[in-house]
Image: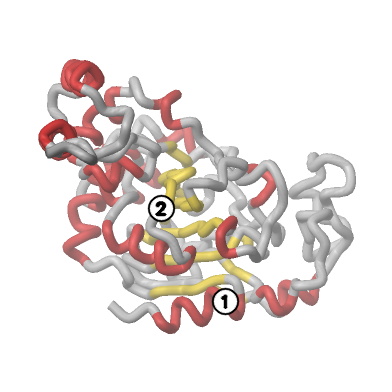
Amino acid sequence: MDLTQAISDWQSQGFAVLPGYLPDEALGPAVAELEVMFPSAEGFHSGRDPRRGRFVGDEFAGIDSFPFASTKISLLAVHDRLVRLARTLLRSDNLRLYTAEAWAKYTGANDYDQELHRDYLNHTLVVPTHGIEQQQVEMFVYLVDVPEELGPPHLVPTGQTANLPAKPNWYPRQADASGSSDAPEGFLASARPELYEREVSAAGPAGTVVAFQLGTFHRGTALTRSDGARYTMHLGFRHAEAEWSDRKGWADRSHDPAWYRFVEHASPAQLELFGFPPPGHSYWTPATLDGAALRYPGLDLSPWRSRLDAAVRAPSRGSR
């Protein structure tokens, strides 16, 4: 797959929109399990789904964090195409998935129209950087079609914001905007309506991926379609060494039943994205492998065992 245009857009404007990047065969199993996690559009708007109340009154109430109740959606978060895109943009094979969320939004449940902002305040301990070895890539992944009336993100090319400092972080359209009035002092700017005139819509079909840099200004937009629903994932990848950039401590979620279900279906390379030691790592010994077999009885440990067995059989340097 040719990602030349994505690389160019990523470098020149701070984001790349890849319409339909995930094919139907990748999306299908995950989309079939959406109702394991969220009400359907009909179930929400008719009031028949008893989970409806959770999503009303808070724009972030529709977020579920990894590992997901749906194993298929968990596996989609580390799909080969998404990992390949992250590796291409960050120019490294040694990455970590530092955040993964699934998000359901419903017309009328909340006001999803946001102010332009950057995400760095809860994605890193420091500030965005242009250094390629320290960069992060965020992704919006569309599980369904997201036309303009279903609230696609809007983004501002970084050429339009290059001179803006790290603080403030929120730029409202109007001077009396109150959406981020609870922000700590100095993080909410005065009105910058011209930025909204320069934003680009990322509307697209199911399977679209929007990849953007941590310093890219963007915002969520309102859902206006009657009885509408929008289902997406929000992912974040970073260089493995960039330990200052994290949102989740995966060990904190690793005794969740959904994690055990995910591990049983994940490959060694997918597990490594969470910091799971890869085959051949010095962590692995007969004792730790036996312990892992007890903790994860459904995990095929043969890739790890074969590498350890090969190391044991290899003659030591200098032997005759």
Give the residue number, with chain letter if any, for mark 2. 94
The residue located at (79%, 57%) in the rendering is 166
Query: Mark 2 packing: few (<14 Cα in 10 Å), some, or many (20+)?
Result: few
The residue located at (83%, 54%) in the rendering is 167
In which quarter of the view is residue 37 placed? Answer: top left
Q: Are marks 1 and 2 in contact (CB under 8 Å)?
A: no
Question: What amino acid type is highlighted by mark number 2?
Answer: Asn
Residue 265 pos. (x, y %): 18, 39
The residue located at (59%, 44%) in the rendering is 245
The residue located at (61%, 77%) in the rendering is 13
Q: Which mark is residue 111?
A: none
Residue 162 pos. (x, y %): 76, 72
Q: Quadrant of the N terminus?
A: bottom left
Q: Secondary structure at mark 1?
A: helix
Is residue 104 rendered to the left or right of residue 294? right
Q: Which mark is residue 11?
A: 1
Is residue 72 rendered to the left or right of residue 101? left
Distance from the alpha carbon under mark 1 to that under mark 2 = 20 Å
Q: Looking at the image, can residue 226 be seen?
A: yes
Query: Mark 1 packing: few (<14 Cα in 10 Å), some, or many (20+)?
Result: some
Q: Is residue 178 above or below residue 218?
A: above
Residue 189 pos. (x, y %): 86, 57
Q: Earlier in the sequence, mark 1 or mark 2?
A: 1
